[in-house]
Amino acid sequence: MQPLTLPPRLLMGPGPINCYPRVLQAMATQLVGQYDPAMTDYMNETMALYRRVFNTQNQQTFLIDGTSRAGIEAALVSVLEPGDKVLVPIFGRFGYLLAEIAERADADVHTIEVPWGEVFAPEQIEEAIKRIRPKVLAIVQGDTSTTMLQPLDALGAICREYDVLFYTDATASIGGNPFETDKWQVDAVTVGLQKCLGGPSGSAPISMSDRFVQAVRRRHHVEAGIRDSHHTGAKGARIRSNYFDLAMIMDYWGDERLNHHTEAATMLFGSRECAVALLSEGQDDVLARHQTAGLAMLRGIQALGLTPFGDLKHKMSNVVGVYIPDGVDGEQVRHDLLHLFNIEIGTSFGPLKGKIWRIGTMGYNARQDAVLHTLQSLETVLRRQGFSMPAGAGVDAAMAVYAGQAQG
Ligand SMILES: *Cc1c(COP(=O)(O)O)cnc(C)c1O
């Protein structure tokens, strides 16, 4: 049997991306017992670090073990009781995921949609809230399927006015685009590591406001005789998932440390390191690095004579959709980039399948050299397919963005 060997890919798709080396190092750390003070101290520290990542004072800020959708599922199944109304504005693939998860919780799901490549105006959402009067608004911040970034800053106030709980999935956007839990009055947010936070998938940081916590706590969560005295007087339907029962997970991360799952310690070490990487470089500097890399990629793509997808005013900094030019075989280009250059770029889904590639510049890969390698390789592969463009124009345009940045 051979040792584990993988090709040295440069992951320039919409995620996952290459991890920060320090995150991989942290994940090679030996374990301690799950109630060892050394472990519980790191759990507490990780909660504090993610409060800073989310820009919140929320006490209830911790990790759900599982990929990003574990966080989404925990938030939605813990807050939505059967028959509860939820409004899901959909502008891409992950909006459908939120709606599906809410449906499986037997919620009364209402959706509104805009065409892929656009986002909602706050008035559209307010109008739907007035009409539907949902308990929860569930919306994605950045949807990698369309590359769009939904503005959230006006939605919190609207939700407070109509007494709606405001949940968002910021998996694709956190770390590369601004996110302000408290300032925007977000009641619950969940994310993952494998986009701009520069880690592997497998941990889903979450933060919840007191309003959201109350809505979860009022429900039963009696576990097989162990906690029947706990939270007596709870009203509402019992949370249908044990693994994703946020009331139980809060008690596990809280001072009581009531046993729930065995914390995925290796993922905790990785998640902690992602937060440390972000905060020690500085949130503003990391955002600026993503903005510069994203702009350099965009300008490079345009200089190659390619057309970006969607409303560029609302594009996430960290991913760009690129129309596959007429006469070019999009899958062949991806194949050649992967096998000749060890570079991965993304395909797309749904209405965009076969129409655009998606190229990411996230986390560890939001770097000048990664942008330049990708543009140069893409140019070469396209030329071999008979698509002509000015030689070197993509790289030159990207370097001009970095040069402008350096001059301030
Ligand atoms: C990438 C992405 C996810 C990923 O979910 P996983 O369960 O980690 O695969 C979730 N939500 C959004 C908006 C994403 O872009």
Image (cartoon, rainbow, N blue to C red):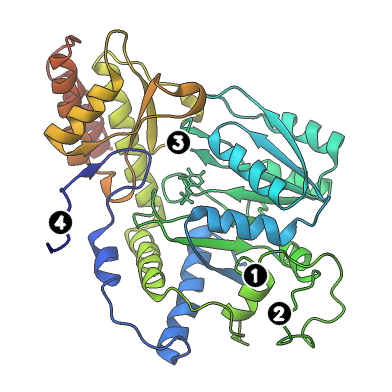
The dot on residue 348 is: none
Earlier residue among tags 2 and 1: 2
Residue 342 % position (x, y):
16, 39
Mark 4 C-beta to ligand 1 under 8 Å: no
The amino acid marked with disc number 2 is: Glu
Residue drawn where x is 48% and y is 62% of the image: 66
The amino acid marked with disc number 1 is: Asn
Real-space Cα separation, disc 1 to disc 3, in angstroms: 35 Å
* Viewer-nearest residue: 394 or 86: 86
| Residue receiving disc 2 | 223
Q: Does residue 399 appear in this view?
A: no
* Viewer-nearest residue: 398 or 93: 93
Q: Quadrant of the C terminus?
A: top left
Secondary structure of residue under mark 4: loop
The dot on residue 5 is: 4
Residue mark closest to the camera, 1 vs 3: 1
Earlier residue among tags 4 and 1: 4
Mark 1 C-beta to ligand 1 under 8 Å: no
**Tags 2 and 1 touching, CB below 8 Å:** yes
The amino acid marked with disc number 4 is: Thr
Earlier residue among tags 2 and 4: 4
Earlier residue among tags 1 and 3: 1
Real-space Cα separation, disc 2 to disc 4, in angstroms: 43 Å
**Tags 1 and 3 touching, CB below 8 Å:** no
Q: Quadrant of the N terminus?
A: bottom left
| Residue receiving disc 1 | 242
Earlier residue among tags 2 and 3: 2
Estimate how packed mark 4 is, as few (under 14), some (14 to 19) or many (20 or more) residues with alpha carbons within 10 Å.
few
The dot on residue 316 is: 3
Residue 340 % position (x, y):
12, 32
Secondary structure of residue under mark 2: loop
Earlier residue among tags 4 and 3: 4
